[in-house]
Amino acid sequence: MLKKLASGLRELMKKLLSTGHIDEKVVNEIIKDLQKILIEADVNIELVFKLSERIKERILKEKPLPGFTQREHAIKVIYDELVKLVGEKQEILLKPCKILLIGLFGSGKTTTAGKLALWYRKRGLRPGLVGCDIHRPAAMDQLEQIAKQISVPYFISRELKDAVEIAKQGIEKLKKADVLIFDSAGRDALDEELAEELKRLKQAINPDEVLLIIPADLGQVAKKQAEEFHKLVGITGVVITKLDGTAKGGGALTACATSGAPVKFIGFGEKLDAFDVFDPKRFISRLIGMGDIEALLEKAKEVISKEKAKTLQEKLETGKFDLNDFKEQLLTLRKMGSLSSILEAIPGLGMALPKGIDLSKEEEKIKKWCVIIDSMTKEERANPEIINSSRIKRIAKGSGTKEEDVRELLRHYEQAKKIAKMIRGRGMIKFLRKFGLKL
């Protein structure tokens, strides 16, 4: 998500890590680069300059905490201030509740309803979807399709023309659901008709949460929209969608944080599982290339057993794995999501990945690599260092691939070992724990 912003911040972190001595000249250069990165991400200029002043003052005047080098202190200051910039982590209701989703036309409310339902279902609660958008012709069909896709009960009506009546019937029909999620109508602008309908819906539903759905491409305009909806129905939080496809995401995040409307969830892709709680610490950690092992392990727990998830963590930290382990991790990665999102969650790897690398092509190769590994002998899988030219030729023939494909697999395996060694050797886990990250 936010690829341009992430790329800029990671280059900045690499520059800082390679700096020998931190003095005022170096700090001024870092601040100048940071200002450019944030302004290009559509963050409010006034906010950027206030942030810059705080960072400069803290780096130069604050004494580093025990165990911190001057460079680590500078990184921690930047990290802390960026976390503050995007807001605080909000409490998420994990109990029976009713949630009303509101927002303008095209913000992604219906898709978000499905994503939210899936998120709650994965946490052991029984969600239900109610379609209250009577204005958009395809709204009911879309909600029905999404509900069936994720196997969640739903209520829609193509006959009723009153959103409030649909909501009331939905509450009655879906009594067994723990979490009722209501999708509402939107407009191109917040007009009187929409305002009146939302007020009536809120009164009829009496929701525990009123979540405003805002697309990231609104940028700084998100602040005004959040304030208007908050005055109208008293929103309890914001969901920012489409964070994967815009350069203005930084503006939307910071705008909501300064509007008094806290961001609770973020959507970062078209898939229904491309959705998560907005945790500022983890978000910024991932953005600047320090990874998010916590999210990685949560994802792993969804597709593999607790024991295997623990093993995955150990292998990432120790680097002790052979080609059997490598294949198992490749298969796990395919279940866990895109390769780019997984690799970026590994501590330090975000900063280590070459700039502009296209990971989509790498994902296509995973299936081929698994076939190649299957064509090896047990001894070769357990001891890859014995694989020589003649063995490569035999493996390629047996797997129906080219010799260069086998060599490419072995290179990636070696790279994976080096990355794991880098994480362990540089004390990356210990380093990240200094920042208060749970690893």
Image (cartoon, rainbow, N blue to C red):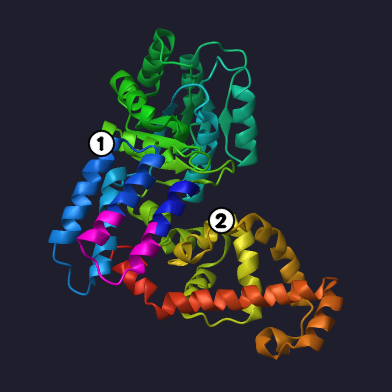
Q: Residues within 10 Å of mark 2 (few under 14, many from 20)?
A: few
Q: Say which of 61 and 121 sits in front.
A: 61
In this picture, is 356 found above or below 91?
A: below
Q: Amino acid at mark 2?
A: Gly
The verdict on residue 293 being magenta is no
Residue 1 visible from this viewpoint: no
Which residue lies at the image location 56% right of the left edge and 57% below the top edge?
Answer: 340
Give the magenta range.
12-29
User: Where does the C terminus fall, quadrant-wise?
Assistant: bottom left
> Compared to 325, does 434 lie above or below?
above
Q: Is residue 14 magenta?
A: yes
Q: Compute the Cα span from label 2 to label 1.
A: 30 Å
Q: Is residue 17 left or right of residue 330?
A: left
Left or right of 139 in this view: 405: right
Upstream in sequence: badge 2 or badge 1: 1
Which residue is located at x 39 percent, y 35 percent?
A: 252
**Residue behind mark 2:** 356
Label 1: which residue?
46
Mark 1 crowd level (few <14, some 14–19, many ≥20, 10 Å Cα): few
Q: Position of residue 292 (x, y in %)?
A: 42, 60
From the viewer's perspective, is 419 left or right of 12?
right
> Which labelled disc corresponds to residue 141?
none
Name the one closer to the observer, 13 or 410.
13
At horizontal 57% and vertical 65% (from top left) the residue drawn is: 304
* Residue 238 visible in the picture: yes
Report the magenta stretch's main SS: helix
**Mark 2 secondary-structure assignment:** loop
Tags 2 and 1 touching, CB below 8 Å: no
Locate residue 387: give its quadrant.
bottom right
Disc 1 on helix, strand or loop? helix
Q: Is residue 362 above or below residue 401?
A: above
Q: Amino acid at mark 1?
A: Glu
